Amino acid sequence: MRWRSRYDLLHPGTGRPVKMHRNGWRFAPETMDRVLAEGRILFGVDENVTATYKRFLAESAMSAVKPVIAQDRASATRRLDDLLGERRFASPKDEYVLGDWMDMAAGHDPNAVVLDFFGGSSSTLHAVANLNLADAGSRRCILVTNNEVSPQRAGELTGQGLSAGDPEWEEWGVFTRVTEPRLDALTSGRRPDGTMHSGGVVPLNAVSYDLVTNITGTLDQWQALGAGQREEPLGLRPAA
């Protein structure tokens, strides 16, 4: 009923009716009384300026998924370089962009579980840790990666007569060079060379599982997977 949106709204300073919107007020009188009591109505300098509804940023910042996110692509690389003290991984995903998307996809659930099957740079885990730090959440991240060596480095190592599995080969793998050192730097504040980075410390509990047995077949075989695992704590600082 249109008439219910047309009534006098008094300016708190002048006591006179505020200039009404052309189509009337957005709320019925009883709703307007409630939002007024909540401090949700923003008045102008006097009654000649129409009133507007006050929506807080926290209520609208994540209300719709942006089709395009404008972000400096190099910034994530610079932050990772700072954590590791050198360029070890080119073009990692941006942990802040990932955090925004994951939080929206999970409906802002502070107990969400995030799975990343290709987590070599550990940007996903970094993003989850940032979210937990921001709102004291208990999100968990399952990060899966191999210890793959870049094609260029693999060619160089092959030329030296080395192959996958050799210690000199494995030390150039993504887990050894990036995943584990990044998480350690996050929780300790120190780069692999012992110097302090500028990224701040992020509380994190982490355990690594090294799959040493490949199995295929039945569900029972998969449920017995624990017999083919080796659990190795990463030695990271526990969350407070």
Image (tube, rainbow, N blue to C red):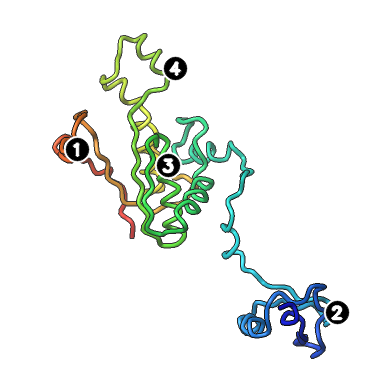
Q: Foreground mark, 3 or 1? A: 1
Q: Are marks 4 and 2 in contact (CB under 8 Å)?
A: no
225 vs 120, nearest the viewer: 225
**N-term-proximal mark, 3 vs 1:** 3
Q: Disc 4 marks which amino acid?
A: Gln
Q: Is residue 113 left or right of residue 39?
A: left
Q: Disc 1 marks which amino acid?
A: Leu
Q: Foreground mark, 3 or 2? A: 2
In the picture, residue 219 is in which quadrant?
Answer: top left
Q: Are marks 3 and 2 in contact (CB under 8 Å)?
A: no
Residue at x 76%, y 85% (from the top left corner): 7
Residue 176, percent from left and from top: 34, 31
According to the image, label 4 marks what residue?
152
2 vs 82, nearest the viewer: 2
Q: Secondary structure at mark 1?
A: helix
155 up-or-down from 67: above or below: above
The label number, if any, that marks residue 219 in the structure image: 1
Q: Quadrant of the C terminus?
A: bottom left
Q: Foreground mark, 3 or 4? A: 4
* Alpha carbons under labels 2 and 1: distance apart: 72 Å
According to the image, label 3 marks what residue?
195
* Alpha carbons under labels 3 and 2: distance apart: 61 Å
Q: Disc 3 marks which amino acid?
A: Thr
Residue 100, percent from left and from top: 52, 51
192 vs 177, nearest the viewer: 177
In the picture, residue 138 is in which quadrant?
Answer: bottom left
**N-term-proximal mark, 4 vs 1:** 4
According to the image, label 2 marks what residue?
48
* Alpha carbons under labels 3 and 4: distance apart: 28 Å
**N-term-proximal mark, 3 vs 4:** 4
